[in-house]
Amino acid sequence: MTIAPGTRLGRYEVRSLLGAGGMGEVYRAHDAALGRDVAIKVLTPEVAGNPDRLKRFEQEARATSLLNHPNILATYDFGTTDGSPYVVSELLEGETLRERLLSGALSTRTTVRFGAQIARGLSAAHEKGIVHRDLKPENIFITSDSHVKILDFGLAKLLDPPISEELISEAETMQVKTEAGVLMGTVGYMSPEQVRGKPADHRSDIFALGTVLYEMVTAKRAFRGDSAIETMNAILKEDPPPVQTSGRLSSPALERVINHCLEKRPQDRFQSARDLAFGLETITGLSDLQTVSSAQQMLSRKRDIKRLWPVLAVLAVVVLLLAAFIFGRNSVTPAIPVYQQLTFRRGSLFTARFTPDGKSIFFSATWNGNPIDIYSVRTESPEQQTLGLPNTSILSVSSMGEMAVLLKSRFLFHSVNQGTLARMQLAGGSAREILEDVQEADWSPDGKNLAVIRFDRVQNLLEYPIGKVLYKTTGYISNVRVSPRNDFVAFLDHPVHGDSRGFVTVVDTNGNTKKLSDEWSGADGLAWTPDGREIWFTATKAGEAASLYAVTLSGKERVVMRAPVELKLQDISRDGTVLITGNHLTTPIAGLPRGETRERDLSWLNRVLITDLSPDGTSFVFNEFGQGSGANYATYLRKMDGSPAVHLGDGYGLARSPDGKWVISIWFTPPQLILLPTGAGQSKQLERFGIEQYGYGASWLPDGKNIVFVGKELGHASRSYVQNIDGGPPRPITPEGVVGSLVSPDGKFLLGRDRSNKKTLYSVATGEARQLAALETDDWVIRWGSDANSIYTCTRNQMPVKLYKVNLDTGRKELLKELTPADQAGIPGAINVLMTPDAKAYIYSFTRDLSDLYLVKGLQ
């Protein structure tokens, strides 16, 4: 079935046929709604009628729709035409790796660069629980700008069924395109466990990538026999010829990486694609790449050197004399960055921006416990001037000398505030309000338009200019910056609302987005370089302090600066001077045990969040998400008597079971609910079913068999679900956009809230809603009281923190206590409070962020 040019498939207009294969045909088409060209893969009617081939097509569509990474082919849409399914994906210009290899082996440097990109793409798939299982040169595409894309997730699955005798006998040893019927991958690139018919996990993809790397650098198959059986036997029992003896000089470090990928036992290989990517990326900094190049030149010029050695000797003497003369006159040293501290007060600094001439800086900060305000400072003097605008924070400074500011600024989480967007002159004057519910904004290069991040019911929107939505997410967006050429908007995309992990992302003026980085465990701070060629950003990986990195629009990353303190990039001036904050963060914990009159200092580690206090007030659960934790954080249990904390396991722990034996914990990468034992025993994973992402919030029903958690399904906003821990799919309780995990003591009601913090009660059994007039928007709920008629609340964003008991029937508020940390400097956000049902014991924690502002010159 060939589709004629001009035919419309939904909103797509077919332009031309790009190619055909065993599964169907691929067309170039135009997306009229978004104004871009796309590729549409259409199954032929014959294939669509074949259940096995249709299943493979649907498998590929489902797998790729879950993945959003710069090194994986992006899937946009699905549909059906005349009974034949089709999938819409990004249109690629370039060639497959197989086509590239027809011209011969690749250089070591190119192999390393391409291999690292493939590994990063596989890492993203593996973190989603997806194994490719058919990685080979035909399924790797090299774009015209040398960017790698992984194709064809048609075999993607978590586990392999056994390979049948018929398949082994029919398998091909040489394929130049993916043929229908080869269900378990291509023989020459299978892992030993695949050949044996055993389950294949992510380490099978690592083996396959090893065979691809070998072929890239040698132009020969790592394993190849005269028949499929002989090829499989070689995979099981033989090692490929050493790279160094294959006719090409190569990097010893690269050969070691390849050999490590090709270990016969999965446990002997790299254990993650991320580790493999790191191993490849480190090669680019090793001298053996230069050694390879030098060795090749020496081999080709060996005879010339013997013939010309007298001339070379004379030249060497001249060079040495000249070098000695120059060195004696002017010793040259590498450029070293120069730092200048600009602030010296105790408190938290949020956003800072250069003025157009780069001579002055405007920033917002909370000094010595005072409300947030805007200050100015000259680069040549540490004297600060306040603008006298309490509860106002600066967002951006335009090239025309105008500020975008946030009025009535209200702290949400991390460095995110929300308020009313306004504009005002740097010279002073009244602010003119523009838009409500805004979190961030950035001026266009000409100072005429603003890119904004704002909240709209259940999602974050990125608009540029105001009113034109370029991107939206149920997570959140931060650090929006318009490029110097006004062709892209860069930002940090955080998939989990309230969690700082995220990606560096750009979107063009037509709404086409592109992720430029892998997911960072924490990301905050971003700016374009003056020439627009790189985006600099500050981010952290598990176990590291936040450092300064750079990434190009093609996704090439590099380290710009590391430091022993947390860094946050604020701005880059036109001459390349960098404005950065150094942050010292701590999270003090204090608590009052039952029967005592003085609070105890219960602090532990440096970046923690308390989540659960036992009903008797004797112990609490907290999470560590600083340098001592992993990608999914770490869950701890500690007694209120001050004894050492106990590490329960990886994950973000939330609530203990009624019998105290289990803690519900969340993994974000890959998404998973885990039950961690508080004593002896093994952790348990709950089946995900259709949940693609978990949010902050989970608790137990009184029966100890059912839990309530916050999560979201593909294509939907977050909501609350109930699930039995012994099996069975989760059932939604709240509507989309409403979340909560606090269950009444009788297990009948769930307290839900939307993004505006409006609270509603929902029946756990039926989902029926009941409005709560007794609770106001500013009330932050701590927990239920001893019965279903009372709730404890607090005012978290003001000092002192006031704790109340609220009667839900009458609306009466009873003030229980006021909490005030002795030192209020550097507390940018809320105080987190937990209480026992009888209010006889409590615990609280907060983040103390002491920031200093620096100018840095000489960074490259």
Image: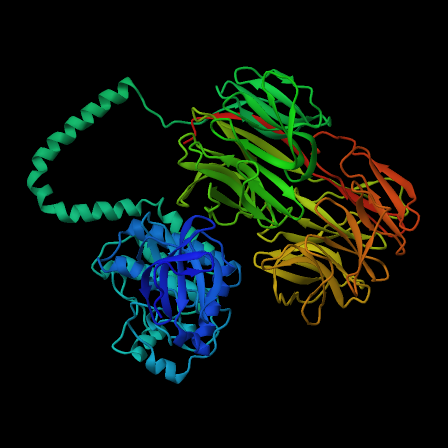
Left/right placement of residue 292 relative to residue 12 reads left
Displayed quadrant of residue 637 = bottom right
**Between 715 and 699, which is closer to the camera in this rendering?**
715
Residue in the image at 32% along x and 57% along y:
255
Number of marks in picture: 0
Expressed as whole percent of the image width and height from the top left, the position of residue 830 reads 73, 39
Could you tell me which quadrant the N terminus lies in?
Answer: bottom left
Residue at the outermost bottom position: 165
* Relative image position of residue 244 (x, y in whole percent): 25, 58
- Is 470 in front, or is 839? 470
In this rendering, does residue 526 appear at all?
no
> Compared to 159, does 276 lie above or below?
above
Where is residue 812? Give x, y as percent. Answer: 92, 44
The answer to whether residue 797 shows anywhere in this view is yes
**Residue 562 on image: x %, y %:** 49, 36
Q: On the rendered image, what quadrant is the C terminus found in? A: top left
Relative to 44, does residue 712 appear above or below in the rendering?
A: above
